[in-house]
Amino acid sequence: MSHPEILRLEQIEVLYDQVILAVRDVSLHLAQGEIVALLGANGAGKSSTLKAISSLVRAQRGEIARGRIFYQGQDITHAPAHTLVQGGLVQVLEGRHCFAHLSVEENLLLGAFARKPSRAQLRQSLERIYQYFPRLKERRKSLTGYTSGGEQQMVAIGRALIADPRLVLLDEPSMGLAPQIVEEIFDIVARLNQQEGVAFLVAEQNIHLTLEYAHRGYILESGRVVGHGTAQELKQREDIDALYLGQA
Ligand code: ATP
């Protein structure tokens, strides 16, 4: 690994309702500026792993996360989500979670909440986002509820970018979107990675497409890592389609 490590998970477990072990002994790492895929079928534990990283697993709801998580060398296990955002670690939740009754630009600005930037910095951040997502600039005054699913996914990613992240946890960006839009979104992720060195941990069921963009990947099945390697190595695995269907 030529770049320093940005994220390391050591033996993560996520338990729901005391009995459902959604993530079992997951260890993984990302280098700065890497795109790493977290692949697996429906229910494999991808979202739960991302939630454990960004402290969205909640003890008061009977959810428990165990193990250790390091971000840029610091132990961030159970660190509050807003301190992670300030430190440059941001999650884009599955299902996008945009506010339908707010405009596209208002939704984007919500991402700046934890950083408290000046007006000039905000304007600059918005312009940077619009450079990557020209569609959002065109639609900046539209109510987000009237935009397409692909545009809402772009808003969700754009909102994360306004926090000026070093690492984005991206949960199923392809969900419910036409293949052409998914490629458009992955192309933007690749540009952000190449031009700005933003690292991405991408949870996806769409294994083939994600491996076209990721440098490396981990395969999850029933909450365990059952394989990992470079994108090239994973593409050559014969059981990859069975994993795609959750039958491995
Ligand atoms: P998906 O693509 O459907 O989101 P996933 O790989 O992200 O799948 P998780 O959402 O992490 O998987 O789910 C892993 C397991 O944990 C599944 O069996 C799921 O039913 C269970 N699970 C997830 N969230 C909860 C919860 N809040 N309470 C109870 N069980 C949960």
Image: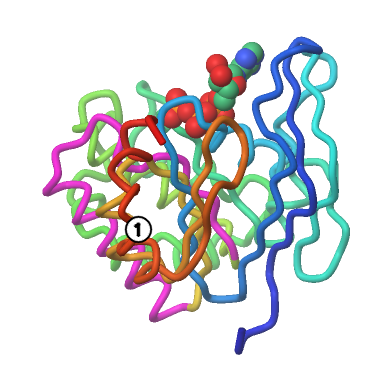
Quarter of the view holding residue 94: top left
Judging depth in this view, the residue of 146 and 8 nearest the camera is 8
* Residue 29, image x, y percentages: 66, 64
- The magenta stretch spans residue 194: yes
Query: Looking at numbered disc 1 in the image, what kind of residue is underneath it?
Result: Arg
Can you say which quadrant of the picture contains the N terminus? Answer: bottom right
Check disc 1 and report its element: helix, strand or loop: loop
Give the residue drawn at x 71%, y 35%: 24
The residue to which callout 1 is attached is 237
Q: Quadrant of residue 238?
A: bottom left
Residue 81: image x %, image y %? Answer: 74, 42
Q: Would you say the beta carbon of the disc 1 residue lies within 8 angstroms of ligand 1?
A: no
In the image: residue 93, left or right of residue 191: right
Residue 141 lies in the magenta stretch: no
Magenta range: 167-196
Q: From the top left corner, tell me how far across and down residue 20 is, in percent.
A: 70, 16
Which colour scheme appears in the figure? rainbow
Residue at image position (27%, 45%) is: 140
- Say if residue 98 shows up in the picture: no
The vertical placement of 194 against 218, above or below, is below
Residue depicted at x 55% and y 60%: 119
How many numbered marks have been drawn onto this rendered protein structure? 1
**Ligand 1 placement by image quarter:** top right
Which quadrant holds the C terminus?
Answer: top left
On the image, the x and y values in percent for residue 47 come to: 55, 34
Q: Nearer the viewer, residue 87 or 21?
A: 21
